[in-house]
Image (cartoon, grey):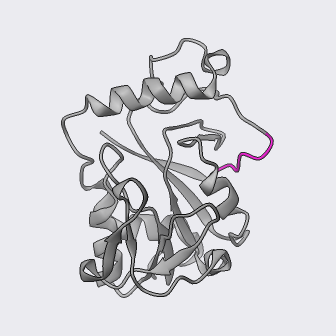
Amino acid sequence: MTMDLAPDASLAGKDALRASILAKRQSRVAQAPDLFRDFQTLSGLANPAAASQPSQVWAIYASVPPEPDTWPLITAAYEAGIDVLLPVLGSQPNWARYAGPDQLRASWRGILEPTTPALGPEALRAADLIIVSGLAGTPQGDRLGTGGGWYDRALAWASPQAQKVLLLYEGEIFDELPTDPWDVRVDSIATAG
């Protein structure tokens, strides 16, 4: 299902497309359904050869409304003993281990980040599943982010074996998107209603 915001996304330009998608997201009433609670399914994406075993390290973005809600997934993965990395926001990518809701602080734009020690950008090399934020994607793996390039810089540190999964709402998948040479593709898209 493709979104009907811009008839020709490749000509609309990234900023105009971002504004349209954000406006549509702001009008949503419902939060993401249980899809993001299903960490066993996402574990299968991360490690298809051993789908019965959960991945050991997941990097997950800390969602804020109106993004698809990642907090049930973060909690379920942490409670299952998975090592969860959350972004530490700044001009350069950085990560820290999630150690529960008591060890979080608000950072840029109110996004929560761990108060545990920052591990640097290279910490992402250990992740076998990376849950990536974005506003839109294509079946080929192109991703439209929020415009800062943080994830494109961060994903340069990912292991080639890591599965990069973009979380979107239904209707945010396009046949094509405007891209730049530095845009990093994802491996798959998971959608919520």
Front-most of 189 and 26? 26
Residue at the image position 68 percent from the left and 49 percent from the top: 185
Quarter the C terminus occupies: top left
Residue 190 x, y percent position in the rendering: 44, 49
Number of marks present in the image shown: 0
Quarter the N terminus occupies: top left
Residue at the image position 59 percent from the left and 59 percent from the top: 164
Residue 102 lies, with reference to residue 167, above or below; the image says below
Residue at the image position 45 percent from the left and 17 percent from the top: 5
Quarter of the figure with residue 157: bottom right
Residue 153 lies, with reference to residue 169, above or below; the image says below
In the rendered structure, which segment of residues is drawn in magenta?
A: 181-186
Lateral position of residue 38 relative to residue 171, left or right:
left
Quarter of the figure with residue 121: bottom right
Query: Would you say residue 185 sits in the magenta stretch?
Result: yes
Residue at the image position 58 percent from the left and 72 percent from the top: 94
Q: Residue furthest left?
A: 29
Residue 71 x, y percent position in the rendering: 30, 64
Residue 95 x, y percent position in the rendering: 54, 75
Quarter of the figure with residue 139: top right
Would you say the magenta stretch is mainly helix, strand or loop?
A: loop
Judge whether residue 3 can be spotted in this image.
yes
Residue 29 lies, with reference to residue 33, above or below; the image says above
Q: Residue furthest right?
A: 181
Query: Would you say residue 66 sits in the magenta stretch?
Result: no
Lateral position of residue 134 relative to residue 13, left or right:
left
Residue 61 x, y percent position in the rendering: 45, 62
Front-most of 168 and 152? 152
Judge whether residue 55 can be spotted in this image.
no
